[in-house]
Amino acid sequence: MLTVKQKQDYNENLKEFKAYQDDLKKDVSLYKVQMKKNKASEPYYQIAIIMHSIRFINTCILINELSVAKLEIKSETYLNLGRKEIYSVLSSLEKVVGNDYDGGLGDNKEALAAIALIPPLQRLNLLKNLKDIIDKMVEAYGSSSKWKWSWPEIHFKFAVVAKNFFDFRAYERESDLSSDNYYVYREHYELIIELCNFAAQEYRSKFDLSTTDTNDLRKSVAMLDLIRKIYQITGDTDDLEKTKNLIDSLNMKIESLEEEKKKDKKKKK
């Protein structure tokens, strides 16, 4: 049984968190007004909105942790607010760098030029912060959540924007240890590979444990194919061959399953 003191403590702390979130919302509203007035700076305003949204989501996670600690129950209300805001962040990121995942790795040239004032380290830190809150949100919901199979889509979208935020030309130019940005580019590169691999695995798990829908396997292949393109330009031949083999294996599985479905339909006619 919860005491009156426990409930009072929770409500007092909640007031502080809500006041902070209200301040964030006010800032975002101002950014949106300014963004309409200055279209040339829109990508920068979008980045500012994204950073505020990340803080908002993190506060939702903290409120849930407070609820668990003080009331011994999850705050589904704030978890859902945070989860929905993740989609908003990804949508804003797509507005900045696009959501293309099957084009060339240099197709983001114009998008990156529009945010040239944001240095590589700041771009990387934004993505790392977003990864951290997504991981925390997934953990907060737990493995038995009804939203369990919505996470692969989020991981897919995140992997794509992480790739589109990366300057592959600059990475090749500054592949020398003496370059100021060498370690930043390298970490961003490794993050993209990690996110793509994870999204691919998430869709395979969704297929195996939930849907048996070949579209989920196709999403997995799309992520692996993105990794393949990256390995081709970076010359990582060992991992390139492994990735190609996995893509071939999944494509064969998709083809086999779809052939079986066609046969079943014919039998039913």
Image (spheres, rainbow, N blue to C red):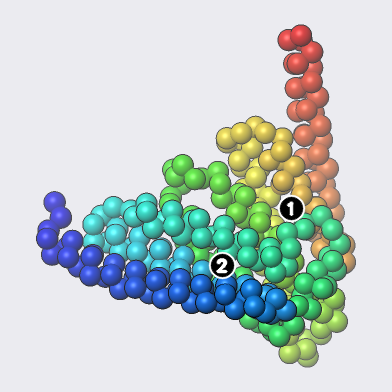
Going 37% across and 52% down the picture, which residue do you hit? 76
Residue 122, percent across and down? 63, 81
User: Nearest the camera: 133 or 244?
Assistant: 133
The answer to whether the residue labelled 1 contacts the one labelled 2, judged by CB atoms less than 8 Å apart, is: no
- Going from N to C along the chain, the mark reached first, 1 or 2, is 2
Three-letter amino acid code at the position of disc 2: Leu
Residue under circle 1? Answer: 223
Going 12% across and 60% down the picture, which residue do you hit? 4
Residue 57, percent across and down? 46, 65
Q: Could you say which quadrant of the image residue 23 lies in?
A: bottom left
Residue under circle 2? Answer: 130
Q: Determine the secondary structure under disc 2.
A: helix
User: Nearest the camera: 42 or 247?
Assistant: 42
Labels 1, 2: front one: 2
Above or below, comparing residue 173 to residue 211 in the picture = below
Residue 150, percent across and down? 56, 46
